[in-house]
Amino acid sequence: MPASESHAATRAAVIAAIVKFTGDETLTDIPDSASLAQCGIDSLAVLEFVALIEDEFRIEFDEATFTSANFRTVGQIVEVVQQVRRAERT
């Protein structure tokens, strides 16, 4: 699968997880620069959302990956999910 398709598929799945978590179906066309707060996920709910991402993608974030910098925006979440998935394949 080409990298762009992989990115697009991962992005779509992350956005679907955001919609599932928040129940806000208007969030289907959000930019990569949108923060979780802009998506309706406050700082107290981030841990629950990250657990949902782990379940949805069947991955686990280690301590080094689980930083606020990696989970600030939609684009950052897509990138960290792709990094973890690549690492698990090797």
Image (spheres, grey):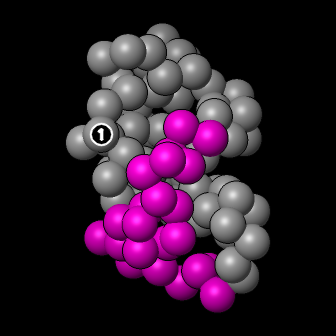
Seen from this angle, which residue lies furthest bottom? 26
Q: Residue at x 55, y 49 (%)?
A: 45
In the foreground, 72 or 31? 72
In the foreground, 16 or 49? 49
Visible residue check, residue 41: yes
**Where's residue 21, x and y in %?**
70, 59
Quadrant of the rendered image containing residue 34: bottom left
Question: Is residue 58 positioned above or below 48 on the image?
Answer: above
State left or right for residue 88 relative to residue 28: left
Q: State yes or no: residue 36 in magenta.
A: yes
State left or right for residue 25 relative to residue 32: right
Residue range in magenta is 26-48
Q: State yes or no: residue 51 in magenta.
A: no
Visible residue check, residue 1: no
Disc 1 secondary structure class: helix
Quadrant of the rendered image containing residue 37: bottom left
Q: How many marks?
A: 1
**Where's residue 27, x and y in %?**
59, 80
Residue, disc 1: 68
Type of amino acid under label 1: Ser
In the foreground, 8 or 22? 22
**Where's residue 90, x and y in %?**
48, 12
Question: Is residue 58 positioned above or below 34 on the image?
Answer: above
**Where's residue 22, x and y in %?**
67, 67
Q: Residue at x 45, y 39 (%)?
A: 82
